[in-house]
Amino acid sequence: MQDDFVRLKAVQELDDELRTLTGRAEELPGRITRLRDEAERARKDLAETEAALVERRKEYKLAELDLKTSDEKVAQYSVQLYSAKTNEQYKAFLKEIETQKKQKSKVEDRMIVLLEETEALEKKRRAAEKNAAKFASENEHKVSLLEAEQAELANAIAERRAHREEILQALPAAILKLYTRVLNRMGGIAIVATTGERCNGCFNPIPPQRMVEIDRKDKVYTCEACGRILLPGK
Ligand SMILES: [Zn+2]
């Protein structure tokens, strides 16, 4: 019987360790995902900034072409101006020249804006490049550490489960059955120590007479409130 209590105590300790280990293992996938998402966002931000730069440069090139076209038209109308046969024709050419000049000025204004935007985007790209490189290397390094930890945790969990199984198989069938039943029902905490005449699982008081019986260790007792197996407190 004394040996069974030693075994139950060992199982309780292994269960505690397993809870801690599995709790930690469950956190890791989320942390890995967050690190990868962060790196992905930085990559996307850089790609978007680069795309915006390409757009602005394309638009600037088109604006340059527009300017050239306007200049050509102004030159062409200016020549035609002198060959105008009537006053109306002359006025029409003048109006065309005026329109082209206005158009040119509009395009020039837009080009100034485009240059300013390009400058700002280039600055943004330099920062985004640094950011993307930083997250790509740092986060991948962090992920590899977490993955190594994941593997270690999986080993530690498997090792403790095997150890627990070994100890459980050495228990009398009735105690093993009781343990399995309580474990399934109580979700991971089947064996608890008493603390200050209370069950350490549900914190309900244990009658004094029962405390004496538990301390005697000649029989396995369960908490009357929650059903967990009670071990004498330290
Ligand atoms: Zn209890």
Image (spheres, rainbow, N blue to C red):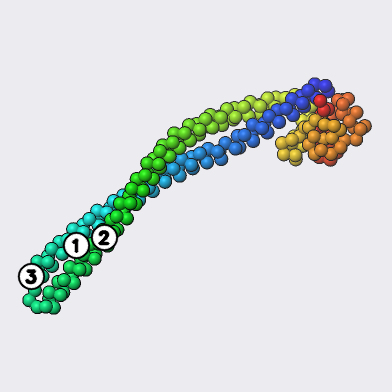
Q: Place residue 205 in its image quadrant.
A: top right
User: Which amino acid type corresponds to the residue marked 2 in the rendered image?
Assistant: Val
Q: Residue furthest top?
A: 3
Q: Place residue 3 in its image quadrant.
A: top right
Q: Is mark 3 within 8 Å of ligand 1?
A: no
Horizontal arrangement in the rendering, residue 208 relative to residue 24 (left or right): right
Q: Earlier in the sequence, mark 1 or mark 3?
A: 1
User: Which amino acid type corresponds to the residue marked 1 in the rendered image?
Assistant: Ser
Helix, strand or loop at mark 2: helix
How far apart are labels 1 and 3 at the CA level?
19 Å
113 and 210: which is toward the camera: 113
Would you call the spot at circle 1 few (<14 residues within 10 Å), some (14-19), or many (20 or more)? many
Q: Would you say residue 227 is visible in this rendering?
A: no
Which quadrant is the N terminus positioned in?
top right
Residues at marks 2 and 1 touching, judged by CB atoms closer than 8 Å: yes
- Residue 28 is situated, as x and y percent measured from the top left of the image, at 57, 36
- Residue 202 is situated, as x and y percent measured from the top left of the image, at 80, 39
The residue positioned 21% from the left and 65% from the top of the image is 101
The residue positioned 44% from the left and 36% from the top of the image is 134
Q: Is residue 205 above or below residue 83?
A: above
Horizontal arrangement in the rendering, residue 95 relative to residue 184 (left or right): left
Q: Is residue 127 above or below residue 111?
A: above
Q: Place residue 80 in its image quadrant.
A: bottom left
Q: Which residue is mark 1?
A: 70
- Residue 66 is situated, as x and y percent measured from the top left of the image, at 22, 59
Q: Which residue is mark 3?
A: 82
